[in-house]
Image (spheres, helix red, strand yellow):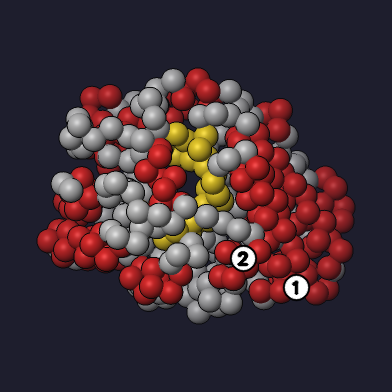
Amino acid sequence: MFRDESRKPDFENLRLILEKKPAPRPVLFEFILSADKEKYLVGADYKTDTEFDRVVTTIKAFDSGGYDFAPIIVRGMEFARKEQKEGATISLNEGALITDRKSFESYPWPDEANADFSIISEAGKHLSEKAKFVAFSHDGILENTIGIVGYENLCYMVYDNPELAAAVFRKVGELIYRYFCRCLEYDEVGAVLCNDDWGFSTQTMLAPDLLRIHVFPWYKKIVEKAHALGKYAILHSCGYYYDIIDDVIEVMGFDGRQSYEDKIVPVEKAYRELHPRLAILGGIDVDFLVRATSGEVYDRCKRMLHMTKETGGYALGSGNSIPDYVPLENYKALLRAALEE
């Protein structure tokens, strides 16, 4: 176990951060940990033979690391896509399955009946007493639409065949919305994380007005559902956000946002600009985590915690996730910065 036994997971700490308030101790936030990092955190308890084993292992890893929650995804509602060639990069134009109304009608849309949401309550028995789940989906509304239409195809479709584009977005949105509604039914879930990349480094993937028509209304409904149940909604979205940040905060009403890159907006700058309108989660750039020394990682994390200690609304973590190519010593330095206080 990496954390000290005296530091017990307690979702109340993350709740305070999402309410843009200070917490009594530093709070950690991460979306995904790579398998090697989970193995380090759980040791001999690492087991992924079944989906249930995988979820329980993640719970134990986040508990060991000092997090106040564990992420969870319910399998079975994935959107079918054509297989893509594996490589260092992939094309967003490959794998199109919907090109016209006929292919739209014949597409094998996900069925809620194929997803066993009871895994939330069953796996929840392994959570620490005061911990909660943060539920996420297999990609988001824009990502799944691009996945089944193709990026360039979608860029043409929204103008050449706007009725079909609207129909695809509506169907994907309805299914993602229903997925999160089902997750939110469970007491073990304290928040949802809507993971949907909306931008490149310098602009949004679609024009902001198109996102406002086809994508944002569904997330507004998801956030409203979470809030109606006394729960929270987090946005995990990569890329440039200046043109849509008011939509994120004022229109959709997200409580917090994760995914920051130094080349777009360093997290220190994001915090100064967005707090206290929005909780800032993570933000220690992944490229920095890979290239920096463990001492540099530790020092930057400490500075970020000291900068936000009195004003709150910040949880320490990576700018995106912890992949396997982040050196273990650097990840340990990030954790140590929070856990030693």
Q: Residues within 10 Å of mark 2 (few under 14, many from 20)?
A: few
In-front residue for pair 224/310 = 310
Q: Residue at point 68% right, 61% down? A: 216
117 to 19, vertically: above or below: above
- Report the Cα–Cα distance between label 2 and label 1: 30 Å
Q: Residues within 10 Å of mark 1 (few under 14, many from 20)?
A: few
> Which quadrant of the figure contains the N terminus?
top left
The x and y percentages for residue 177 are 69, 45
What residue sits right under mark 1 in the picture? 156
- Looking at numbered disc 1 in the image, what kind of residue is underneath it? Tyr
The x and y percentages for residue 72 are 48, 36
Is residue 191 something one can see in this rendering? yes
In-front residue for pair 189/147 = 189
Is residue 69 something one can see in this rendering? no
- Looking at numbered disc 2 in the image, what kind of residue is underneath it? Glu
Q: Quadrant of residue 268?
A: bottom left
Between disc 2 and disc 1, the foreground one is 2
In-front residue for pair 68/21 = 21
Q: Quadrant of residue 114?
A: top right
Q: Quadrant of residue 293?
A: bottom left
Q: Secondary structure at mark 2?
A: helix
What residue sits right under mark 2 in the picture? 250
Q: Residue at point 31% right, 55% down? A: 316
Q: Residue at point 39% right, 68% down? A: 271
Q: Secondary structure at mark 1?
A: helix
Dot 2 or dot 1: first in sequence order is 1
Q: Looking at the rendered structure, which numbered label has been put on residue 262?
A: none
73 to 17, vertically: above or below: above
The x and y percentages for residue 211 are 68, 67
The x and y percentages for residue 161 are 84, 68
